[in-house]
Structures are given as structure tokens and as C-alpha cells.
Image (cartoon, coloured by chain):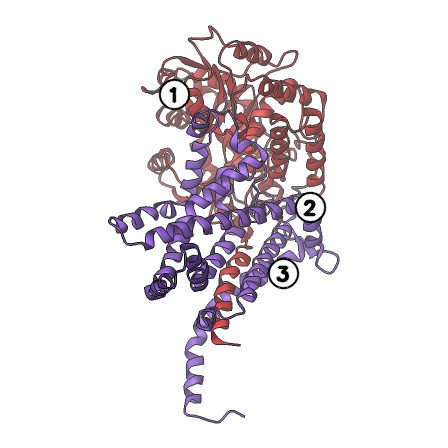
Chain colours: A red, B purple
Amino acid sequence: MSKRFLFMLCAVLACAAFVGACGSDDDEGGGGGGDAATEETGVTEGAKVIDPASMDGATGDVTFCLGKDTSGDKTAAIKRFNESQSEIKADMLEFSTSADEQRTQFVQRQEAQSGECDVFYADVIWTAEFASQKWIFDMTPYTQEREGDLIPATLETVNYDGKTWGMPQQTDAGFLYYRTDQVDEPPATWQETYEVAAQNDGIVYQGAPYEGLTCNYLELAYAAGGEILSEDGKESVIDSPENVAALQLMVDGVKDGTAANGVTTYMEEESRRYFESGRATFMRNWPYAYSLGQKKGTKVSGKFQVAPFPEFEGAGKAAILGGHNLVISQFSENPGGALALVDFLTSEEEQVIMFRDYSLAPTIAAAYDDASVQKEFDFAPELKESVGQARSRPVSPLYPQVSQAIYKNVNEALAGKVSPEEALKTAQTEMQSALETF
Amino acid sequence: MRRRSRGVPERRLAWFMTAPSILLIALVAVWPIIYAIWLSMHEYSLVSAGLSRWASPIGLGNYIDAFGDAEFRDAAVVTLIFTVASVALETVIGLAMAMTMAMAFKGQGVLRTVVLVPWAVLTVVTAIMWRSMFDSNLGFVNTLLGTNTVWLGTEPQALLVMILADVWKTAPFMALLLLAGLQVIPGEIYEAAKVDGASAWQRFKKITLPLLMPALLVALIFRTLDALRIFDLPKVLTNGANGTTSLSLLAQRTFQENRLYGEGAAISILTFLLVMAVSFAYIRLVGGNIRGMTEDR
């Protein structure tokens, strides 16, 4: 074998080796938090339970793990915590801005049984997964005491296996944005929304096959009275008349041109830009688009308002919850101190500061009624209503696959490739086979 | 029997001195591959943590599942179509660009720099740019063509846009590699051919192409391997929707989102084998001796 051939071979192998080496782990995804699986299944037998009394007299250090604090609110909050008392010292360990990376970082520490993260700022869809792995404390005794303070919908995101596993700290719910120069008042039902949209400039939302479409679809499906998973979270029930009705409404909207052309490729930013260019009467989006749209220079500045989602004719109202929960690691060496930090971050004063100064939606109901908050945000009452009627996404440790089954098939139906009935049948089959592997 | 020469103790010393580096490389590069192979033969999923059993039968369960899975087959087909189409286009366009740049003219230096700009732009930024361009309402492509197509939302069109974006980005890379190859060809050969009365096409076919072969093959191997492993472009452009899921994207999704490590590892190893097969095919084509090809002529 000539040297040259050997060299070429090594060069080629080295290039190709990186393909194989990329077979290392990189986890992601999360468990859902919410309605199904509040039934006891015994999966979390033996998990440690938090003792609320451990808060008093706790001393020592506490580490708060979270994603990069780009808005600065947590840094300021930790500073205030340390200044308010001298027994416990809290510090922050910041992970990446990417949600997947944050989850990976926390999961790695739990797998190594490391107590480095006493408290973790977990996305709402991860709670069931962490609970099923017994990585976090059972916080039921503590949350029972605070139940009255919280917006009830937010508690759904921490329910799993009959217990609660975290304290909701920050939440998020979508709005129906509407043009005030075209529509006098927000429509009362989804059906009316589509009718009014057809007479004006249409509606835009997130229809690309990704997590956002799951939220968009569930907002209609839950309102129509449909469910995704059975009570125990082990079976898929997505193929139901209510869900088909919700999907049919969306599909009809795309077919007759009421929904923006290309909505099946749109995520939050694209739909926001479309609405901001003045081409749509209605938009479904998260609260962040409000202040961006009102800025001088957009075509809709001063010409739109927000409303909680309307009713689905003949059924009810719904919204989907986003946000974060505070969870305490089972391997924490200072659970009392961790709980004290959780208690501080979810106190009414802290929640008001978080909302007023950093525009992050709080989970404590009283924070919405604070006068300084209402002065700052004219949509505070709408947000509270929206969060109040919200539900959590399906609870399951296999949430990523559940979500994939939903968004892939809903997108195919929207694109007109399959009928709504077929789409949901396929979704049920795919979801079922994924759930059976657990 | 090897004759003992003065070089033997030196060689042993050389081995000792390179041993630490070799060990480090083995640990960092070889160990993950072996682990990936081990993973691919087990049913290991993080959902049921700690569960790891041999994927029946004889550890090949995940591979058999992969071949039976329509998603995997579709991803393989998409990856192959993408590779063939984009590499072919890149080569033709790159060659044309290289031949233009090889001619000496005013502004040559500026042209060579400008031509490199698409290659310098990050793939993620390229994908976002192309996504905006082909947006069915706000992008200028529909306005220019007067159409209403939802480019990234329909089946063959999305792959077409992906191919175009990749060609736009990497044709300059091909051009540069081929330019280097072109500049090695001595000008006298062309002079001699012109004297003999060869036409431009004959000069291209009989002189340029054969003498360019080494550079061309190196460029082809690079680009083919890259195209087979494409990930960031489909991820940002469409997240794999509408017939743009490549093998790497499928593997990442299986690992990251679904946390099915065994199956994800199997897909990765299969991609690895595909890439290796293509590399070997190239090397066989060349007969293992690229330099020798030019010397023979």
C-alpha cells in the first residue's frame, strides 16, 4: 500500500470519524405538566418529600441553576434575597440560553446524583419527566399551603402521579391580537373570529410543524372539549369528534384563504412580522409581540389590542400555559435553604417586581391586581384572564413524542395532504406506539 | 528479517514520544465511536433510565427497525438526492467560476474576495436569509416571479430551495479549490495545444479536465462527505418538514427530542457507514493514487 493511499485513507477516516463520534448523547425534550396523569400510578414511589418547616432555621449555601438571565430579573432577585437575610447565601449558576441545553445540564447533574443544583428553573413541560425519574422533591406539603395564592391553572403544570413537584414561578399564555381599526370588539367565539377574518384581512398564527403548532392546535382542541391523553397518561385519545371539529375549523380557514398563505411554515417571528406589516386582522401569539408591535414604525402601532382566546362554539374556552417552575433537586444538600429561596421568589412582592419591571407574567394571582403593575401594562387584566382559562400541555414523560405526533399530523392536515380525520387517526397511532415503549 | 539499522532505537523512541498523543486521540475520538456502536446494539432509552438490553436479534434490532422505518428510508433518499444534486451543481458552477477567475484581468483580486463571501456567511445565517427570501408573503422571490407558492411548505419545492441555498453557499469553496488546481497547470501546454490547432472545447476536455483531476477529486470528496452529513441547513430552514429531513437531522431528533439513544446511535452508525462507502468508492475510482494519475499522462 502506497504511503499516499494510507494518508488519503486516514484523512477520509478522520473526516468520517466525526460522523460516528457525533453519535454521543445530547438530550432534549421534556415531560408535559398538566391535566392527565394526576391519577396516582405509583411511578414516583419513594421520592423524598419536602418539609415546609425546614425553611425556618435553614442556613448555608444554595445554588440556583437557570438559563442565561438575559433580562437580569433573577440576578436582581437573588441579590435582594441575600440582602433580606443573613443565614442563607444564594448564588446563581447560569446555563445556556437554549432550553434544550438547560435541560441537558440539569439532567446530567441528576444522573450523576450531584446536588450542585439545589433549585432549578424548569420549563413547565419538563416537570413530569423529572418527577418520573425521581430527580426532584415532592413539594405537596408546601404547595398545599400556598394553593390559594396561585392562579389555579399554573398548578396543573406541577401535578404528576397525584402529587405536586414544583412551585410555579413564571407563566405565559397566548393572546388573540386584533386590529382595532377593522374590528370594534374581540369576537366571542373562534367560529366568529374566522368569519370576521374572512370578511377582512384574515388571521395569522404559527402553523409550522414544531412545538408552537401543538400550542396553537391545543388552544382550539381544549376549547372544543377534546382531550389528548387518558387520565392515567398511558393512552392516546386524540382521535375524537371534538378534536376533529377543532382541526376542521383550522383546515377550512387555510383552504378558503382566511389563514395567511404560507401559515404552515410560520413560527412566532414570521407571524409577528406578517401582522406587523398590516396584512392580517387577527393574530395568535404570545404576549412578547405586544410591545414590539406597538413600537413606532410598525404599520400597526396603536392600532391593535389583545384579548384572551374566545370560546369554541358550543363548548368552552382554553389557552396553553408556558412558563417556568422552581423545582428542588433530590440530591440537594440544603433542601431547607432551597425551599426558603423558592418561597422568596414566589412571594407577592417579588412577583410584582418581576411583572412590572421585567414584563414576565407572574403565577401569584394578587400580583396582577397591583396598581403599579396595571399602570405599566394595560393588558394585565387580559393576561390574568388568559392565564386563568389556560391549561397545561399533556402531561407525560414522553412529551416530545406526544407533541411530535400532534404537530406533524396537524401540519399535514393544514397543508391539505390528508383529511382532518385521517390526520388525527395517524396521530393517535403514532402517539400510542410511543407511549407503549414507556 | 529486518536488518538492524541505526534507525531502530530511534523508531522506538518515536513511538514512546507519540504514545501520549495517540492515547489521547484514542480516548477522545475512538472511544465515542465504540460507545456509539455499543449503544446502537442496545435498546437504551433515557425514558426508562438505566434500561439497556441487547436489541434482539443479536444486537441488530435497532438496525432492522431503521430499515423498516419509513422515516429512515425517506431521510436516506432525501440525503442522497440532495447530495447528488448539490454536489453536481456546485462542481459545474464552481468550475465555471474558477476558470473565470483564472484569467488575468483587472479587479481579479477583488473578484476573488467577493466570491468568497457566501462561503464565509454562517450556514445558520444563510438558512434564515433564504427562509426570509422564500417567505410566501414577505419574501421577494414570490414578488419577483409573480407567484404565490408556499416554497418551504410544499414537498419538492422545499428540497429545491435547500439545494439552491447549499449551492449558493459552497460553490465558492469549490471554485477556490479548483482555482488552485487550475493554477498548477503550466501555461505552455495550452500554448502548444493552440499551436496544434485545438479548439477551446478540445483544450478543456483534453488538457484542463485531466490535469485538474486531483484537485477536482479532493474537492468532490470533501463536498460529498459534507453533503451526506448536512444538518444545520435543513434544521434552520424547515426543521426537516416537507421532505427535507436528512439522515443527520433524523439522528439528532431521535437522540435529542425522543431520547431513544439506541435507535439514534443506529441511525448515526448507518450514516457513518454510508459516508465510508462513498469515500471508498471515490478512492477506488481513483485507484488509490491521485498524484500518479497526472504523472501517467
Mark 3 chain = B
Q: CA distance from mark 3 to mark 2?
A: 21 Å
Q: Amino acid at mark 1?
A: Gly
What x and y, as percent, mark residue A174?
50, 23
Which is in the foreground here, disc 3 or disc 2?
Answer: 2
Q: Residue at x 52, y 61 (%)?
A: A17
Residue B69 numbered mark, or none: 2
Residue A251 vs residue A371, the one in the foreground: A251
Q: Residue at x 36, y 61 (%)?
A: B194
The residue furthest left is B106
SS at mark 3?
helix
Q: CA distance from mark 1 to mark 2?
A: 44 Å
Residue B38 numbered mark, or none: 3
Mark 2 chain = B
Q: Amino acid at mark 3?
A: Trp
Residue A18 vs residue A175, the one in the foreground: A18
Residue B136 numbered mark, or none: none
SS at mark 2?
loop
Q: Residues within 10 Å of mark 1 (few under 14, many from 20)?
A: many
The tag earlier along the polypeptide, 3 or 2, is 3
In the displayed structure, does residue A284 sit left or right of residue A437? left
Where, quadrant-wise, is the C terminus of chain A in this rendering? top right
What x and y, as percent, mark residue A176?
50, 17
The residue furthest top is A184
Residue identified by numbered label 1: A293
What x and y, as percent, mark residue B248?
55, 49
SS at mark 1?
helix
Q: Residues within 10 Å of mark 3 (few under 14, many from 20)?
A: some
Q: Amino acid at mark 2?
A: Asp
Q: Quadrant of residue B179?
A: bottom left
What x and y, as percent, mark residue A283?
49, 19
Q: Residue at x 33, y 52 (%)?
A: B101
